[in-house]
Amino acid sequence: MYKYIIRRLLLMIPVLIGVSIIIFSLIHMAPGDPYSAMIDPNTPTEEIENMLRNIGYYDSLPVKYTKWISRALTGDLGFSIRYQEPVVNIIGRRIGNTLLLSVLSLTLSVVIAVPLGVISATKQYSKFDYIATIFAFIGMSLPAFFFALLMIKFLAFDLKLFPISGMQTIGSGYTGIRLVLDVMHHMMLPVIVLSLLQMASFMRYSRSSVLEVFKQDYIRTARAKGLSERLVIYRHALRNALIPVITLLSSSLGFILSGAILTETVFSWPGMGTLIYQSILNRDYPLVIASTMLLSICVLFANLLADILYAVADPRIKYN
Amino acid sequence: MKKFTSVFLVMVMLLTTLLSGCGSDSKANEAPKVVAGESVAESTTQNTPAAAPTSIPQGGTVKIAYWNAPSGVFAPGLTSDSYDFYVYSLMFEGLMRLNPSLELEPVLAESYTISEDNQTLTFKLREDVKWHDGVDFTAEDVKFTLEFLGHPDYPGTSGSHIAWIVGADAYKKGEVDHISGINVIDPYTISLTMTEVFGASLQKFGTTNMLAKHIWENVEVKKALEATELLRNPVGTGPFKMKTFVPDQYVELAANETYWNHKPNLDSIIIQVTNQETAQAQMLNGEIDMMMISQMNPDDLSLYEESGVVVQMVPMNSNQFMGINNSIDIFKDKKVRQALAYAIDRQSMVDGILNGYGMVAAGPYREDFWAYPENINLYELDQQKAISLLEESGFKYDKASNVMSYNDKPVKWVLKYPTGNKAREQAAVIIQQNLKDIGITIDLQIMEFSTLYEMVKQGDYELYLMAEGASTGDPDVIRFYHSKEIPPNGLNIRQYSNAEVDQLLEEGQKLMEVEDRKPVYQKAAQIINEDLPMVYLFFWYEGRAINGKLMGVNCFPGNNYYGIEDWYLEQ
């Protein structure tokens, strides 16, 4: 197992190099330059060319890539063009905010949705199952953006339970425990939106995979030999039914940094999603590349984690 | 296999991110035009108090919302981001500024004189101005700022006007240590001598925001943009000074107790990031006190009115237009370009898309600007005229099947336009419909702003939509119409070329007085109106929603904060 993990980790290196070449080429081949969207159109063309030359815009793609990778290997991810600040600082400032939202909402949705899915599978065609299914379909078909606006309308604007946007009460100067409470208050709406939407698919997946397992011969055998329904479900069915849920969970983990982009946008949450979106629009090359690389590392690790968890959940799966 | 899957996954992810860039709305593209936005404005000033109150309420915080976070480069001449501008313009000032009627008025200068030959400007500075750190503001700061902008290593884009000063050229080449045309006469008097008469000199040099010499002289000019600490803790002379900057979230500014005019009535100003879609709810809830609105929806406007929110209309000097590629043979014929204008119903765009908050455009200038010519063709909707003009140019129109053809082929053109501005996106559809009425098929291609801008600069288009305008109160449009400004050298993206216009625009740059410039620019505008290198669609208004209790606000193009030291919150 450990050998397998080490081999997978080593394999990531060539994959990441390949990914970096693709990302690098794609973003640099996109038309436009970092200044076309933000500079006053009355600026003389020569001055813009001068600034572009300073950031190495006119170098050929291989030259740009060599420059970037040789610095990246020493840990220098470059200087953001828009923020005039090291890329590492900007990402460092944002990544925590995003993790706060996405880890909490992912945990919440798994903890709530998986048991709900199992229950509605065991009580198939009951009232509980129908209600849960209806809610799941609503959750799956509602666009995040629209759902967030609805929440704002009812919970924030009409009932005034939560603030509409932002991460803290601006200008309040809160510190310590009051700051923590304030941030939690601001987090509520985005977390509700994110976890309700994620819950829907977790619930459907666990329900259908439990139902699938119920049809297997070994379940019939288990029932035939007189095991209690409880034991049948929790010892035999559930464990086997977990595999598709693990797949879903690990793909959600892979997108843990970028998955909340719409929610972050609606609530003006200063996270990674909005950062990546803005930096692509601004052609802020160093920032785009660093953050997309980070996302791909996330995806790679999530894949590895999924494979390991498969082995944990299902003893038939072995790596050597 | 796994390896391939991962690479594939990442590509898909990246693609999704790129694609999502086309869907949603970013106002970043529009903002620079607002900053450069301008012209003679008759701003509505509903918020000015009717009678001067005996005692003005002091204190309070005003929250202003924008759609993007400032990047943190708070220094004039160094920032290229309009969201930074919205912050630093509260902390920095120039020698002069434009007032609501877009005339220059003194700020850090007390007075100015222009020499007989119109080539030397002399500014007499106020003697009671202090930088935020208590150091006196003097003529040395002015000299330092101008030399900073003219320095060979200067890393920004606001220095082009320095080239007009005597000796700026040698300084830019690094041959001399100072610009010889800048002359500090005494600590509070400075004169600038130009190489030749420069029509916009008072405006360009007057409105250049000042940098503090004692702060910036210790920084290598080349590395100015890397001086993060200084950029985030700016020292200016303006009515507000930096208190807290929380990147990606907000900036808090505190009143400058020693402001030369008087201490501002308000205690602090907060500039925060908000989502455009939720801002209205926050405005109505009283969470924010001021924001920009770009869509004047009558329902929204009445909702604001009911909730006691005042909306000020700001007429923009930029216009939306449909650019025509004048280098393509078929568009070299001006009758074809004129026919397009006759075929497009621009009045219905103003009425339908802008809800009447705008005006039909027929040239680079607004109707109420002095450079607007007297005899101008408005190209009012006339499909028959459009068809007959096209037929004169060799097109054939088959009425029965409603097909316009050229060289026996049905006419089909591609119209490219950027995402972001909703009014413009709607205009594209109206254009398609209008041209279909005269048998022309238009293929609409919407794309992200930067991509489109790069394409049109390279001449890779037939028709495109964008916005453009001259600088505040100055009719100079040489960058957009002179034949030497055809890309890659300039912004004459339509590749329009007319020797008479070239000559008039060059002449206009060298005249000082409005009376002298008026006939020159009117003539140029008239020729442009006749040649019609592009179809001008409309000028638009922007709104500023303001808390009804916030008094003294007077927004006009290019400045939302005029006289902010006099703003106050009614109890």
Image: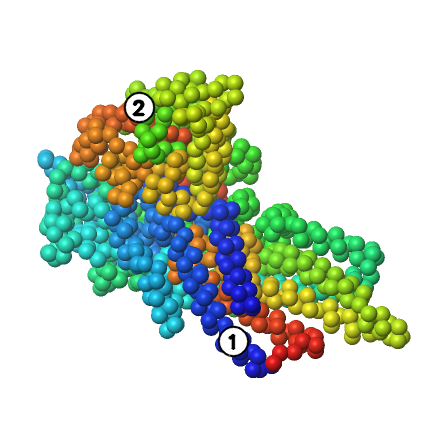
On screen, residue A77 versus residue B311, left or right, reads left
Numbered mark located on residue B530 in the image: 2
At numbered mark 1, what does the secondary structure look like: helix, strand or loop? helix
Quadrant of res B330: top left
Q: Residue at x 53, y 44 (%)?
A: B280
Tag 2: Cα neighbours inside 10 Å, few (<14), some, or many (≥20)?
some
Q: Give the residue type that dot 2 points to.
A: Glu
Labels 1 and 2 in the same subunit: no
Residue A5 x, y percent position in the rendering: 56, 78
Q: Nearer the viewer, residue B117 or A218?
A: A218
Residue placed most toward the observer, A21 or B208:
A21
Q: CA distance from mark 1 to mark 2?
A: 69 Å
| Residue B334: x %, y % from top left | 32, 25
Left or right? Give the position of A220 relative to A305: right
Residue A9 bears which disc, if any?
1
Residue beneath the point at 53% across and 78% down: A7
Colour scheme shown: rainbow
Query: What is the chain identity of the residue bearing mark 1?
Result: A
A30 is higher (above) or lower (below) than B350 = below
